[in-house]
Image: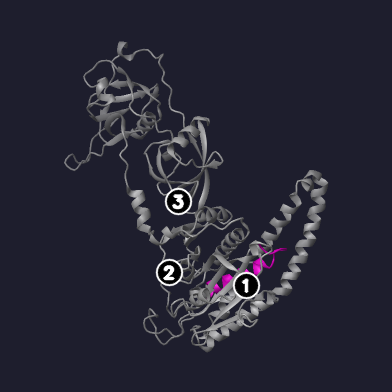
Amino acid sequence: MGRGGWPARDRNQFLRLTWAGTGLLRGVWILAWSACFWASGGWAVAEKRSASQAALDSISVQDLHGHVAYLADDRLEGRLAGTAGAQAAAEYLAQQLARLGLRPAGVDGSYFQPFGKGYRNVLAVLPGSDPKLRQEVIVIGAHYDHIGRGQEGKSRGGVGHIHNGADDNASGTAGLLELAQAFTFLPEPPKRTLLFAFWDAEELGALGSKHWVTQPTLTNHRVVFTLGLDMIGRLRQQRLTIFGTRTSFGLRRLMSQQNQWLNLWLDFDWKLAPNSDHYSFIEKKIPALLFHTGLHEDYHQPTDDTERIEFDGMVQVVRLAWLVGWTLANQEKIPDFRDEARLETPQTLQAMLQRRPELPLRLGVVWSEQEFIGPGVRLVEVVPGLPAAQAGLRPGDHLLRLNGQELHSGPQLQRYVMTTPRTVDLVVFRPGEQHLLKFRIELSGQPMQIGLLWRTDEAEPGAALVTYVVPGSPAAEADIRPGDYIYQLEDQPWPADEAELKRRLKAVPETIRLLVEREGRLRSVQIRLASPSASGSAKDPSTNSQSVPPPTPARPKNLFSKTLHPSYSTAG
């Protein structure tokens, strides 16, 4: 509840009645418009969407500001675990949970789980609605303690001054309160049980979450997932870091699908470290996600105050967390924990992407686009033993046309050679010759229809991780890059291997549609696979009596410093 606003429970009741009334009016209109909508169950879908929208809309700047302002007030003296300030923060959280009508999940029927030297976790539960799945628990947590007046080894400056910790972690605590409130707007709880956990003593070594995983307050339940909010108050350039997507299967795709409503840039960090409460669950082999907007100059400083919080950004982060939590709480199965995640690092990903493949040369030429100004592509090398050399092409030749298409650049030549199934007809200007020359060349190897290399990723079943994109290829022209994920090919999951991909491509038209994800943003990409067809009927240019002017040499600014950067015509 924002200070000066309604109690959350009263406001929730009002909004539920409002939504019910407007829903009835919408229902009358829909009935008049189409009776089949009712028959197909569309009304139920519309009601669910309305309820979800109401839940999302309940996450507001006003409420977030009110919670952060209270928790980061000087009167709480930095909420050091075990102090009067932390006790006051815990009482505030319990009051908010009670107003929401959430069931206490602490000990002895309270919201509190005491432990250690006067520390307290604050816990509330929303029981699941499915008779079977309600025994599975999703823990949504944030730590509410901070470092008080900044002890040595914790403060980055200003020891002895109050460290209010508005971002660390009043922001995550406020976000968790808003998440809990949003779930109360649903006409029916999610299928799985939700535990809203406000951890104490995180700054002392995640003591609160470690205590709970060894002494859980929910009996006859099994924790299957955890979401964490830690420092979510400084969203910059729409970038949000997500830790833990490798701890289970399909989490990156799930995050990206829910993010399409918010369009944030998501940094999927492969690093797993004991730097927040989510790691207490990872150590128990429970999948975990952590939302984090990044460190900044006020981290563990007395200057981490309410006025520096980006509340509009907080709303977006919390809404994304709600969408992800709601999806996980309702899907049929929560995937298992991935043990390999604890061995993977950002360097693991970089090593996967930096392996430059050895692509075969289908034509076998090297060209330079810096050597001259004029039409075509000038060859600077012809590789012995490959199709171009066998056909009689030479260094210095200018390739003007391929299969009737004018050539203007090396990448264009590269694409044509790469996508052409077998035969190419080349029109060539050769210095010293009075006429154009024509060559018909049988290319080696198989065409690469899309122009990318990929690998499967165990953590993302049914997807392709792009590891290399051939310059000038259809994939390059569609702005596909290494590190992108491809989730679908023509509305179907990405093939499991290269053989299946080739089989699938034979059955699709010249243009295919891919669902591509980059940094959490999904886009549908159209790729034209067709290559230029061999003309065959063109008059042999070698019989043309018209002389051809040579291309004009370029004038480099400095002959002694000019360097040559050849590009290889690689095509599959």
Q: What's the residue type where badge 3 is placed?
A: Glu
Q: What's the magenta region? A: 170-190
Which residue in the structure is indicated by mark 3? 458
- Work out whether mark 2 precedes mark 1 in sequence or the reverse, and give the earlier one: 1
> What is the distance, in whole Å, between disc 3 and disc 2 at their CAs?
30 Å
Q: What's the residue type where badge 1 is placed?
A: Asp
Quadrant holding the N terminus: bottom right
Total labels: the figure holds 3
544 in magenta: no
Q: Position of residue 162 (x, y in %)?
A: 46, 85
Does 525 sit left or right of 301 as displayed?
Answer: right
User: Which residue is at the front of the view, 287 or 79?
Assistant: 287
Q: Can the viewer see residue 60?
A: no
Q: Can the viewer see residue 147?
A: yes
Q: What element carries label 3?
A: loop
Which residue in the structure is indicated by mark 2? 295
Name which residue lies at 39% across and 30% down: 447
Q: Residues within 10 Å of mark 2 (few under 14, many from 20)?
A: few
Disc sitting over residue 63 in the figure: 1
